[in-house]
Amino acid sequence: MKKTTLRRMVVLASVIAALTGADANAAWWEHPHDKWYLKDDWKAAEVERYAPAFRLQSPAAGGWVVVWGHDGVELKANGAVVMNEVDRGLVYNADLTPFVRGALEVKLQFGPAHIVAEGELVDDQGRRYPFASGCDWTVPVVPGTNLPPAARPYRPGASSGAFDLAHNGLLLRYND
């Protein structure tokens, strides 16, 4: 192979890498082929239906949730449908911001059956209102507060395949 042909191939590969946004220095979880992970660090417990309600000290600026349901996940925020998923092998996540922004009172409803949920609301002053099924935390919390897990935090069982109870979740970066 001629040097000019090799040089053209290297330049073309560099251009393709630059256009696709590949970052060789990115952490392992930021690579596009590493989007899924096993969620096995729940603080929350498995409960039958979960409906936390919050009275915020100032209007909500945003929020997020990570949730798994034995029969899928139904989630409403202030009456609006956030998600309705049926696969019990996956952990789902959602950005609650469009559903809670500006609200002083936030009501979440999880179903249809056994649910494990963790998340957080943030008001426009930066106060955090974390929540987790099976936990009774006093909110808002100050930064750095170490929240205790539920008495029996949920742990996924043995997996016999990708869609048993492996609880694979799509990785999100909530602080972007």
Image (cartoon, rainbow, N blue to C red):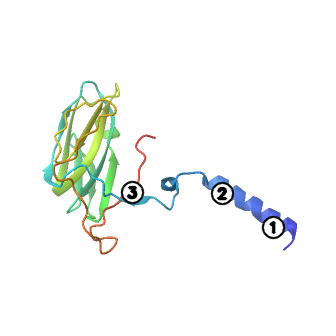
Q: Is disc 2 surrounded by few (<14), some (14 to 19) or many (20+) residues within 10 Å?
A: few
Q: Specify whether 150 is left or right of 39.
A: left
Find the distance from the CA under tag 3 to the CA under tag 1.
39 Å
Image position, residue 45 (x, y; %): 19, 52
Q: Residue at x 27, y 24 (%)?
A: 58
Of labels 2 and 1, earlier in sequence is 1
Which circle marks residue 6 in the picture?
A: 1
Name the element at disc 1: helix
Q: Position of residue 76 (x, y in %)?
A: 22, 46
**Residue 38: quarter of image:** bottom left
The amino acid at mark 1 is Leu
Amino acid residing under circle 2: Ala
**Neighbourhood count class around disc 3 (C-alpha, 10 Å): few under 14, some 14–19, many 20 upward:** some
Pick whichever, 146 or 120, lies toward us: 146
State the separation of the CA atoms marked 2 and 1: 17 Å
Query: Pointer 1: residues within 10 angstroms few (<14), some, or many (20+)?
Result: few
> Can you give x and y, in whole percent of width and height, for residue 100 in the image?
29, 36
Q: Earlier in the sequence, mark 3 or mark 2?
A: 2
**Label drawn at residue 170:** 3
- Identify which residue is drawn at 27% across, 70% down: 158
Alpha-carbon distance for marks 3 and 2? 24 Å
Q: Classify residue 132 as left or right of residue 98.
A: left
Identified at 50% across, 53% down, the residue is 30
Type of amino acid under label 3: Leu
Residue lying at the far left in this picture: please name it: 48
Q: Quadrant of residue 52?
A: top left
Q: Secondary structure at mark 2?
A: helix
Checking the image for residue 155, the label placed there is: none
Query: Which x, y percent locates residue 51?
Result: 16, 44
Compared to residue 174, the image places residue 145 above or below, namely above
Say whether disc 3 or disc 1 marks the residue closer to the N-terminus.
1
Residue receiving disc 2: 17
